[in-house]
Image (cartoon, helix red, strand yellow):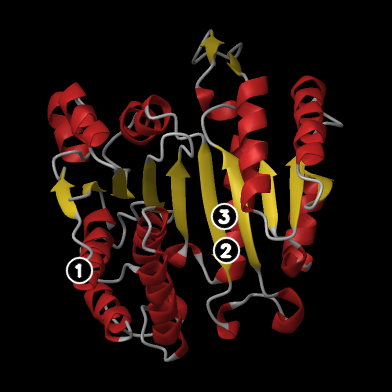
Amino acid sequence: MQSIVVIPGDGIGPEVTDEALTTLEELGLGFGFDVLSHVNADRYLRSGTAMTDSDMERVRQAGAVLFGAVGDSRVRTADYARGVLLRLRAELDLYINSRPARLLHGRLSPLRDVSRGAIDCVIVRENTEGLYAGVGGALRQGTPHEVAVDEEISTYRGVSRVLGYAFSVARREVCMVDKSNAVPNGGRLWQRCWAEAAAGYPAVAASHLYVDAAAMKLASHPAAFDVIVTNNSYGDILSDLAAVLAGGVGAAASANINPDTGFGLYEPVHGSAPDIAGQGLANPIGAILSAALLISDRGHSAEASAIDRAVRAAVAAGRCTPDLGGSLSTKEAGAAVRAELC
């Protein structure tokens, strides 16, 4: 039996994760679920512990993690989030963050001309280096002379492997996004690795944009993109923009993966949304589609496609939560998707 660790987390995380699990169970694929319901802000506030080594061992023994959300307004430090999600990404070397963005329905597009601008692309984001590596420090904190330094880290190995992955999943083209005209050292490394990666995939078209130009083009003509590959911080920003163009962050799924080991952590990108937690307003589609990515990576592509079709059918019929124009609760929206499974 394939095992999946489930970390529901905080806020709306448990609500949406429950709908994703129910959907997977209905498919009858034979997965076993190890639910770490204690990994949350409540325990952190009680004990100061985000994840124990025992928790990490349970994760390592599994084939994948289905993750809900992390974050609680009562926690005033970044140590908690870093101790859960960033620890998982770092220790499991989940160096790829893959975020597909495909328009769910024409009525959800913020663009005027959907026929010209329907988005259908993947943002491939370097997931373990960059500005989020936690390198830096501060001097004279709390004074008028405070100095804060956050350093962006790029390595040849890290950049090369994310570019290689982007080319391996492209259908027609890879666009590499950087800011090498203003960030010369890291930019030079990305440009060097980019030239090497493109040479290894002559059948795939390759293009390059600075991040500001990429943001403008993504907003004005999103259909132009197939795969966008970029560093950690730029990928974070561009993938949120892509999610909005595809229907909203409530429906956005993501995969944090290591293609070499096959391990993956799958999560909706909407965050914990504590302001609506427990009210039945949370959109479960991001979590359900994240579960679809998980099973697809484990050889169940037909069932993953069935989930995708069911989501689109439910949304087209208006059987969804208010953020997508419907009136259903979280549980009702999950049930609506499952009713469309075929």
Amino acid beneath label 3 = Asp
Going by the image, does 188 lie left or right of 239? right
Amino acid beneath label 2 = Ala
The image quadrant that residue 294 belongs to is bottom left
Going by the image, does 45 lie left or right of 136? left
Q: Secondary structure at mark 1?
A: loop
Q: Nearer the viewer, mark 1 or mark 2?
A: 1
The answer to whether the residues at label 3 and label 1 have Cβ atoms under 8 Å apart is no
Q: CA distance from mark 2 to mark 3?
A: 10 Å
Residue at the bottom extreme, as displayed? 317
Give the residue at mark 3.
240
The answer to whether the residues at label 2 and label 3 have Cβ atoms under 8 Å apart is no
The image quadrant that residue 125 belongs to is top right
**Which of the two labelled residues, at mark 2 and mark 3, occupies the earlier sequence position?**
2
Look at 75% across and 29% down and name the residue there. Answer: 193
Q: Position of residue 183 (x, y in %)?
A: 79, 26
Q: Secondary structure at mark 3?
A: helix
**Which of the two labelled residues, at mark 3 and mark 1, occupies the earlier sequence position?**
1
Q: Mark 2 packing: few (<14 Cα in 10 Å), some, or many (20+)? A: many
The image quadrant that residue 289 belongs to is bottom left
Q: Is residue 342 visible?
A: yes
Q: CA distance from mark 3 to mark 1?
A: 32 Å
Q: Nearer the viewer, mark 3 or mark 1?
A: 1
Give the residue at mark 1.
28
Q: Mark 1 packing: few (<14 Cα in 10 Å), some, or many (20+)? A: few
Q: CA distance from mark 1 to mark 2?
A: 27 Å
Look at 66% across and 38% down and name the residue there. Answer: 164
Look at 30% across and 45% down and name the residue there. Answer: 65
Give the residue at mark 2.
101
Q: Is residue 51 visible?
A: no
Taking 254 as reference, is 306 above or below it?
below
Q: Secondary structure at mark 2?
A: strand
